[in-house]
Image (cartoon, rainbow, N blue to C red):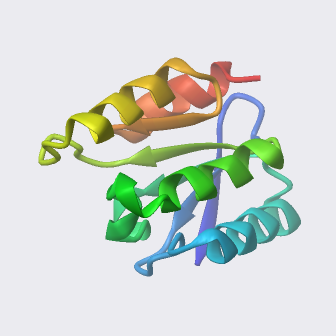
C-alpha cells in the first residue's frame, strides 16, 4: 500500500493499492491507524475497489459499523467509484445522505473527492 498526499493543506491521503483494504471494522481501524502514523493525514481517499463488496449490502450492517469508526476517530473519507449499478433504494438513500454530511463521501472522481474533503473541517 502506498499513499499520495493531496489537498490544499497536504492533509489528504490517497490510498494506492490493488488490495481490499476495508473488509470489516478491524481492517478499517488498521487503515485509520496506518494512515495517521505514516502520513499524519485525517482525510482519506479510497477507491471503491479497495472496499469489500459486502460493505454495499446495507443489511449486513458493515457499512454503518465501519463508517461509525471514521466518525468516532474524526477521520473523513471519500470512496471513489461508480455507484450507478446499485439499484437498492436504501443504499442510494444512504449514499445521498452521507454525501450531504461532512465526514463520508461517495464520489465518482479524485477531483470530486478533493472538492469535498478540502472544504470538510
Q: Quadrant of residue 108?
A: top left
Name the residue nearer the viewer: 100 or 31: 100
Identify the residue shown where x is 32% and y is 68%: 53
What is the x, y in percent for residue 63?
50, 55
Is residue 34 placed above or below 97 in the rendered structure?
A: below
Q: How many marks?
A: 0
Q: Nearer the viewer, residue 81 or 52?
A: 52
- Figure check: 102 above or below 76: above
Q: Which is nearer the eye, 121 or 110?
A: 121
Say which quarter of the image contains residue 36.
bottom right
- Which residue extends farthest front? 59
Quarter of the image that includes the N terminus? bottom right
Q: Is residue 52 left or right of residue 87?
A: right
Q: Nearer the viewer, residue 4 or 117?
A: 117
Q: Is residue 110 left or right of residue 73?
A: left
- Residue 21 locus on image (x, y percent): 53, 74
Q: Is residue 4 left or right of residue 30?
A: left
Residue located 60% across and 73% down the image: 2
The x, y position of residue 77, in whole percent, is 60, 44
Q: Quadrant of the C terminus?
A: top right
Q: Residue at x 81, y 46 (%)?
A: 72
Is residue 12 something that shows in the picture?
Answer: no
Q: Residue at x 23, y 44 (%)?
A: 83
Is any atom of residue 18 visible in this view? Answer: yes
Residue 118's x, y, as percent?
65, 25
Amino acid at each position: 500500500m502506498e499513499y499520495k498526499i493531496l489537498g490544499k493543506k497536504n492533509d489528504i491521503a490517497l490510498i494506492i493499492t490493488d488490495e481490499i483494504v476495508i473488509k470489516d471494522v478491524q481492517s478499517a481501524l488498521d487503515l485509520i491507524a496506518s494512515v495517521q502514523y505514516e502520513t499524519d493525514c485525517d482525510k482519506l481517499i479510497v477507491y471503491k475497489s479497495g472496499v469489500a463488496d459486502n460493505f454495499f449490502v446495507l443489511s449486513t450492517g458493515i457499512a454503518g459499523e465501519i463508517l461509525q469508526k471514521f466518525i468516532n476517530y474524526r477521520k473523513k473519507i471519500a470512496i471513489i467509484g461508480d455507484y450507478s449499478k446499485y439499484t437498492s433504494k436504501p443504499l442510494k438513500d444512504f449514499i445521498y445522505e452521507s454525501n450531504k454530511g461532512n465526514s463520508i463521501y461517495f464520489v465518482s472522481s479524485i477531483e470530486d473527492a478533493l472538492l469535498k474533503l478540502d472544504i470538510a473541517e
